[in-house]
Every structure is written in C-alpha cells, then in structure tokens.
Image (spheres, helix red, strand yellow):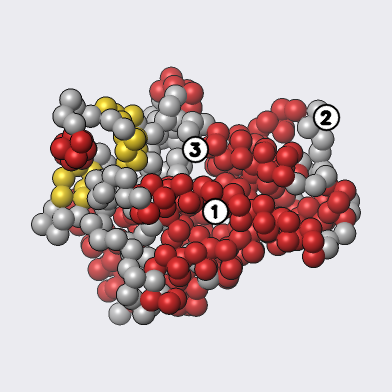
Amino acid sequence: MTIAKTNNNKGANTTNLLETNFGSRDERDHYKPFKRVGYPPIFIWPIQPVKGLKWILSIPGYFLPWNSLYIFIGILSWYYLSPPLEDYSQVTVQQTFLCFAKNSLLVLVYFGIFHFHFYFKKNQGRIFKFNPNWPNKKNKTFLFSNQNIDNVIWTFGSGVTIWTLLEISILYLAANDVLSLIKRDERPIYFLFMIITIHLWRDIHFYFVHRAVHWAPLYRHAHYIHHKNNNPGPWSGLAMHPTEHFLYFSCALIYLFLPFHPLFVIITLTHAGLSPAPGHAGFERFVSGKKSFDIDAHAHYLHHKYFECNYADGIMPLDRWFGTFHDGSPEAQAELRKRLKEQSLKKG
C-alpha cells in the first residue's frame, strides 16, 4: 500500500497530475501503471533475509494492511458475532440464517466501501481506472443486462450461501467431536503460526483451484461467469458459479485433516470472502484527499484482461514458478502471445 502525496496543485488538476506520476494512458485511453507487477523480497533466490524481514514488518508488507485487516475481521466475527461452538452441535434454520446474515453484512460493508467510493460517488472519477469505461448496464450476457446487478446476485445468492454452508458444516463436525480441536492456551505457538500463515495457504490453494477452473470443461461450465467481467468492479470479485464458489471456499476444508481452533475456519473463510474486493476494484490506486495508495489490483486486472496469466496474485511467486506470470510490460505480453501460440500448435 504505497502512500503518495500529490503536488501543490488543487482540485481535479492535482488529481490528474497524480495519475501521470504513476502511469499513462494508451491510445484507447486505458490506464497503464509505470510500476510493474512484482513479488516481495521473500520466496526468491538468492535469499534476502534482511529485506524479507523488513517487508514482513513494513507497510505495505505481509501483515499490513490487508492480512491484519482480515485477521481482525475474523476475530470480530468469531468472538463477537458468532454463537459459542457448542451451539453448532445441532444445525437449525435460525442459526443458518443468522450466520448467512453475518457473512452478508461483512460483504455488504466491505465490498460496499469500494463500490461507494469508486463507482457510486465516483470520488476520483476515472483517475487510476484501468479500463476507462464504467460497468456495463446494457449487456445481455449479464443478468438483467446489468453487470453490477448480475455480480451482486451471484455474490449473495451463491457466494455467501456456500461460504455460510461450509462454515456451519465444519463447525458442526467440530462441535460433535468429529474433528480434532485445539484450545488457544494449550498450543499457543501452533495457534499463532496457523493464523499468520493462512494467507500463504490461501495463495497456494487459490492458484491451483484457479488453474483448474480454466480447464476447458470447467471453464465452460462455471468459470465463464466470472470472466464475463473483463472490466471488473468490486462486486465482480465473488461473481462466480456455485461450482466455482465451492472450489474457491474449499480452502477451509484443510481443517478436516489438521488440528484447529474454530477461529482458523472463520479467518480463512473471511479472507477468501473479502479479499476479492480490492483485487477486482478496477483501479490501481485509491485516492483520499491529497494522497493515494496502491490497492494491489494490477496483477489480477491483467488476468481479467488477458485470461491466461496471473492465476495467483499473492505474495508467493507461483505464476513465475509455473510460467504464467505477467508483469504488465510489453515484453510480458509478447511472452504470453508466444506461450499461447505454442499451446495452440500442440493442440492442433
């Protein structure tokens, strides 16, 4: 989350000048950041322990701003918005509805903040917007021909529903002693380790699930719904087919095999449920007053634009390791075309 101040100009001129400090627009008026997509100084060779440690503790870094936020919301969700574990021993309609309402509230508020700023109030206009166009309101590929309405329906009707059902199912098994539970005070090191590495697990899980749904049969069955959003907005983040939602939220199923505390499940699902909002915002930077900060959306925007790249956009260089990385440069685009051409020749 790189913070930057504008120059001394005021009003719109200041904001426009701010954009030119960070990127330029091409002949189609699409915004292209000067900064290339990259990875933090960790999980790279040669090992850079000092830089890696600084990154973990810095802003932006491993914990701040995003991971700490999702951990905090997860803690709030479990300890203040959820019933005690023993209440999950019997699943009721009322309990399921309350859990759905809780998760819906989290999504409504968090996604709503990005939508309100960027799209409802248009507080920064098109400044830092990758695609100059606004979400489509007259496209029959979307439900009711409206991209935002379509996205919201898939988000709550399928996404939050499946998130809720997985959450309740895992906690039901835990409450009935089917799974191996730990207490926070009995294994504090393991407890802390699991919480702070949830993001790493999410990175790995998301990459391979994402590659899987790009397999032609799964793409035609499910993932095409998400990729209708080639000009994504915040609500596009969870706009998926139910099959993809199940695969996406299946990151929490790891606790069927590992000792866990209920909080692990809540944080993992909260991380999965909320983190798509900034990544699909459609803007590189969030402008507030005379400052702006990077919201880490460029890598995933490139995926929506070019499809066969940047399947993961986290801290682990999985795309680089597996040859699917795109940093936004002309060289990376040429390499993508070459890779796709080679794949086409092999198929045909």
Residue 268 in the image: above or below residue 227:
above
* Front-most of residues 310 and 71: 71
Which dot marks residue 266? none
**Left or right of 190: which side holds 118?**
left
- Which of the 4 image quadrants contains residue 50? top left
Residues under labels 2 and 3: Cα distance?
28 Å
Q: Secondary structure at mark 3?
A: helix
Residue 199 in the image: above or below residue 220:
above
Residues under labels 1 and 2: Cα distance?
36 Å
First in sequence: mark 1 vs mark 2? 1
* Front-most of residues 28 and 316: 28
Q: Secondary structure at mark 2?
A: loop
Q: How busy is the neighbourhood of tag 2: few (under 14 within 10 Å), some, or many (20 plus)? A: few
Task: Read off the residue under disc 3.
Answer: 66
**Left or right of 231: which side holds 257?**
right
Task: Read off the residue under disc 1.
Answer: 108
The residue most toward the top is 50
Return the x and y of residue 156 as percentages of the image width and height: 57, 63
Task: Name the residue located 33 percent from the left edge and 76 percent from the top edge.
Answer: 139
**Left or right of 296: which side holds 180?**
right
Quadrant of the image containing the C terminus = bottom left
Return the x and y of residue 163 as percentages of the image width and height: 64, 59
Number of marks in the image?
3
Labelled pair 1, 3 in contact (Cβ < 8 Å):
no
In the rendered image, is residue 340 in sight?
yes
Quadrant of the image containing the N terminus = top left
Task: Name the residue located 38 percent from the left edge and 38 percent from the top edge.
Answer: 39
Task: Name the residue located 27 percent from the left edge and 74 percent from the top edge.
Answer: 345
Tag 3: amino acid? Trp
Task: Read off the residue under disc 2.
Answer: 186
First in sequence: mark 1 vs mark 3? 3
Tell me the mark number nearer the camera, choosing from 1 and 3.
Answer: 1
